[in-house]
């Protein structure tokens, strides 16, 4: 009997230690030394493939959270964006718990409800820890913008607003202290709001919230960004020069996304930027245009090739967990972004961190964006390493690509076609599971002539392709 007890204790201890190891294995993130990308604390680059699940803290049970996280892990998402508590109203989570006490029908953000048993904030911790155990980072909005910056149409204070400067600082300090030992948190302020709208200026409140987060984290270096309102100035317009802003975030439709990324990348001091919210899969827009898997792909590839350090996916049934969310979690767009993750993994550490956007590689017609919000694209978007030993071009509708080969490293290049819909390579018009160049020994470097690459199949909507040129044969 004694031997059995000792064995049981050893087994429990082993499982406990290994669980802790899984959490610890997910390293905190930082901004790369060149101010362009995110890396782990030991300097290894991390491409962020995020999903939008704003309302998960109060909409899902533990079991549903496990289902959601397992599916997103399977689909190669490594970050999820969520809001700490209800966006505008007073609402319990699925277990009947409120985050704060209520006074005059409003939450008191300085009075979080803490229980000996499992409470609201324990449920958020469960999400954070479960995500960490699956290699997923949490992009945590401590509050939605409605609680700080008022009505999204006017900026005027209204019933949802509960923060001023003092309350924002104290709450930020409290919530950061509550989760300060979690390695997988990226803080996100804003929440679909302008920091300034007309005569209403909420920058001081957001600044106080950021200072509270830093104080609650023990003044250690943490990542903080800002989630702006669509079609409006992005985070850089209000906070780029603030020391707390680690990187910029944009929310725009396809037609403005690359302009916003380019604007951010030309600012000083250098800070990374990315698409934190774009068009959601399944959303219908003016004129009957619907965001489908093609729009999911073109938003991701175009912004990443324009210089973003990552991208964020959204689905009309997932962000607020509608009744059909378990079906829609497998929508095509969600299952295809893993191919972009794979593509970026082929770059060496140096190539990844020194990658730059470069439209000057392209010769001739580079396409355009039409339709509502630019949802129909024929754009060519080019990126390359600083050394020019590798280049990639995204052709949104399979249009042909002419490159100025003299701008790339000589003396020759291998050329590959990559299918962003399937993750397969293409050689002589046929799909291939192996990394195989469709052409070798293409002259590059000084005095090399322009070269036209004809994409597989005929140009048309959703026939997108990625052309990759490399000095050396690509390897997994």
Image: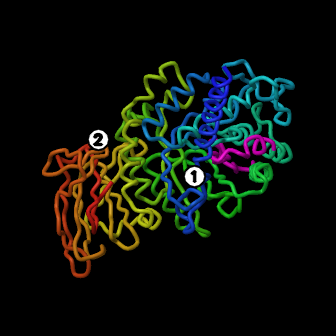
* Residue 165 locus on image (x, y percent): 83, 48
The magenta stretch spans residue 182: yes
Element type at mark 2: loop
Side of 470 relative to 31 (left or right): left
Image mark count: 2
Q: Are marks 1 and 2 in contact (CB under 8 Å)?
A: no
Residue 472's label in the rendered image is none
Return the residue nearer the eye: 322 or 354: 354
N-terminal of the pair, mark 1 or mark 2, is 1
Task: Check if residue 224 falls in the magenta segment.
Answer: no
**Where 150 sits versus 31, above or below?**
above
For the point 59% across and 60% down, the residue is 31
Q: Is residue 453 left or right of residue 43?
A: left
Residue located beneath label 1 in the image: 249
Residue most extreme to the front: 2
Q: Secondary structure at mark 1?
A: strand
Q: Camera-side residue: 115 or 397?
A: 115
Badge 1 crowding class, 10 Å Cα cut-off, few under 14, some 14 to 19, many 20 or more, is many
Q: Give percent across and percent down for residue 470.
A: 28, 65
Task: Report crowding for label 2: few under 14, some 14 to 19, many 20 or more residues within 10 A (C-alpha).
Answer: some
Visible residue check, residue 202: no
Looking at the rendering, the stretch of residues picked out in magenta corresponds to 174-200
Q: Which mark is residue 422?
A: 2
- What residue is drawn where x is 58% and y is 41%? 22
């Amino acid at each position: 009997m004694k031997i059995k007890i000792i064995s049981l204790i050893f087994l429990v201890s082993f499982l406990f230690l290994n669980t802790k190891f899984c959490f610890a294995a997910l390293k905190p993130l930082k901004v790369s030394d060149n101010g362009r990308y995110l890396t782990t604390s030991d300097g290894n680059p991390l491409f962020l493939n995020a999903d939008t699940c704003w309302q998960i803290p109060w909409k899902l049970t533990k079991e549903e959270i496990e289902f959601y996280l397992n599916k997103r892990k399977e689909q190669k998402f490594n970050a999820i964006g969520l809001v700490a508590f209800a966006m505008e109203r007073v609402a319990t989570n699925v277990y009947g718990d409120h985050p704060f006490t209520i006074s005059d029908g409003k939450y008191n953000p300085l009075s979080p409800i803490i229980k000996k048993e499992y409470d609201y904030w324990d449920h958020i911790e469960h999400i954070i820890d479960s995500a960490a155990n699956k290699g997923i980072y949490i992009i945590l909005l401590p509050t939605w913008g409605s609680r700080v910056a008022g009505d999204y149409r006017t900026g005027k204070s209204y019933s949802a607003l509960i923060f001023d400067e003092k309350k924002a600082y104290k709450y930020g300090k409290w919530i950061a202290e509550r989760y300060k030992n979690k390695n997988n948190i990226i803080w996100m302020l804003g929440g679909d709001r302008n920091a300034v709208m007309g005569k209403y200026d909420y920058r001081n409140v957001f600044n106080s919230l950021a200072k509270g987060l830093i104080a609650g984290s023990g003044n250690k270096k943490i990542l903080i960004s800002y989630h702006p309102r669509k079609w409006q100035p992005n985070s850089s317009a209000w906070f780029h020069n603030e020391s707390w802003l680690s990187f910029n975030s944009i929310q725009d439709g396809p037609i403005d996304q690359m302009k916003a990324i380019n604007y951010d990348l030309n600012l000083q001091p250098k800070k990374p930027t990315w698409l934190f919210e774009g068009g959601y899969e399944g959303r219908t827009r003016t004129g009957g245009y619907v965001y489908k898997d093609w729009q999911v792909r073109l938003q991701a590839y175009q912004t990443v090739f324009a210089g973003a350090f990552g991208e964020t996916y959204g689905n009309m049934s997932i962000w607020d967990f509608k009744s059909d969310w378990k079906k829609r979690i497998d929508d095509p767009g969600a299952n295809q972004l893993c191919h972009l993750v794979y593509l970026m993994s082929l770059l060496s550490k140096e190539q990844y961190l020194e990658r730059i956007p470069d439209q000057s590689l392209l010769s001739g017609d580079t396409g355009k964006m039409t339709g509502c919000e630019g949802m129909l694209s024929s754009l060519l978007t080019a990126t390359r390493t600083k050394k020019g030993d590798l280049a990639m071009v995204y052709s949104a509708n399979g249009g042909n690509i002419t490159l100025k080969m003299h701008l790339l490293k000589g003396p020759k290049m291998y050329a590959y076609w990559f299918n962003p819909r399937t993750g397969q390579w293409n050689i002589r018009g046929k799909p291939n599971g192996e990394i195989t160049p469709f052409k070798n020994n293409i002259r590059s470097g000084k005095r090399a002539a322009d070269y036209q690459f004809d994409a597989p199949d005929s140009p048309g909507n959703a026939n997108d392709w990625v052309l990759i040129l490399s000095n050396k044969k690509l390897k997994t």
